Amino acid sequence: MEANAAGRRRRAGWLAALLIGLLGCVDTPGKSDPGIEPAAVPAKVYQWKIITTWPKFLPGAGMSAENLADRLRVMSDGRLDIRVYGAGELVGAFEVFDSVSSGTAEMGHGAAYYWRGKMPVAPLFTAIPFGMTAQEVNAWLRYGGGLALWRELYAPFDVVPFAAGNTGVQMAGWFNKEINALEDLAGLKMRIPGLGGEVLERSGGVPVTIPGGEVFTALQTGVIDATEWVGPYNDLALGLYSAGRYYYYPGWHEPGAVLELIVNRQAYEALPADLQEMVATAAQAINDDTLADYTARSVAALETLEREHGTLLRPLPAEVIGKLRETSLQVVADAAGEDELSRRIYDSYTGFLQGVRRYTELTEQAYLEAR
Ligand code: CA
């Protein structure tokens, strides 16, 4: 009984203090009143910009930036309010990295291989020819030391990277003539970024890197002879079927392209710990969601391409694939460059690939062959 009475007294005292606190707050705002908890101050709202290398609302890649911003707004109860800009709206597609580095925008969404001119080893954080699949690269980034190396590579630019999307295995691309032998690549002017472009060049072709928003026009007007972009879902959206006749597979050059979220270091470090964790968690969710989106929608898109647009599917001949693989090994080794960090990244990537290759052969590959 005595304990209950004491409890009631404590609750009454607490209630009175709360009422005094509330009334006090209304009557004398800002006035300090010792012994009474101050009223909660409104949470600080961070109004950020995310700039992207994608056309605004591009299915898959472009929507992953929109989804990231939407999720963060809800998760943070409006405290992290991010406005999304498509390529060219605030800065050009290929200015995204520098603009996040300088703080023009707090965030960017794109792909590491676009920054190859600045960091030759960067493509290892998107995709390399005959490299890891989405499942394998996620394992390397999260549990094989890949993400830590990626952070180290971007650190001098005050940019913090996160994996935030994956396309899965891409298609080899759109061609207006059939590729029957390696000679058919000679002189071929093709939009193909990253190390795949380098492989094409060493195979006699002419690689071109242009942003997604310009690919269709370049192919249609004959500025380029061929292009890769992503896969059925994205390629249908860009209308590439009306500019290219043959749709080749597999995407030997991009077997699981990682899309990146990059954040300006100072902006990121200024966030409270809970918002930092939300950014990391949202990036991981988007990383997973984008792959599911690409996979599911590409099924329907491929059907539309074949049935409605008469797209002709062609596998790259084994002889061509064999030669491309051979050249790729050398191109990737050369891309690693001379410096110590690039070498560590190359060793880490290829070491992980070596190990996971055997495991994948026993699991995914053996299963797919059995299915
Ligand atoms: Ca691509």
Image (tube, rainbow, N blue to C red):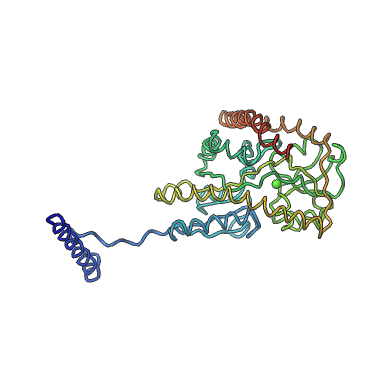
Q: Residue at x 76, y 44 (%)?
A: 172
Along the viewing direction, whichever of 82 and 361 lies nearer the viewer: 361
Please say whether residue 65 is visible from this viewpoint. yes
Quarter that holds the C terminus: top right
Along the viewing direction, whichever of 309 and 31 lies nearer the viewer: 309
Name above or below for residue 134 compared with residue 27.
Answer: above
Spot occupied by residue 320 in the image (x, y as percentages of width and height): 82, 36
Quarter that holds the N terminus: bottom left
Name above or below for residue 135 compared with residue 290.
Answer: above
Please say whether residue 97 is visible from this viewpoint. no
Q: Residue at x 57, y 37 (%)?
A: 139
Q: Residue furthest front?
A: 1
Q: Quadrant of residue 122?
A: top right
Name above or below for residue 288 compared with residue 19.
Answer: above
Q: Residue at x 55, y 33 (%)?
A: 144
Q: Quadrant of residue 154?
A: top right
Is residue 160 rendered to the left or right of residue 13? Answer: right
Is residue 97 rendered to the left or right of residue 206? Answer: left
Q: Residue furthest left?
A: 2
Along the viewing direction, whichever of 184 and 171 lies nearer the viewer: 171
Spot occupied by residue 85 in the image (x, y as percentages of width and height): 58, 59
Number of marks present in the image shown: 0
Spot occupied by residue 253 in the image (x, y as percentages of width and height): 72, 40
Name above or below for residue 328 compared with residue 57.
Answer: above
Spot occupied by residue 297 in the image (x, y as percentages of width and height): 68, 55
Is residue 348 rendered to the left or right of residue 310? Answer: left
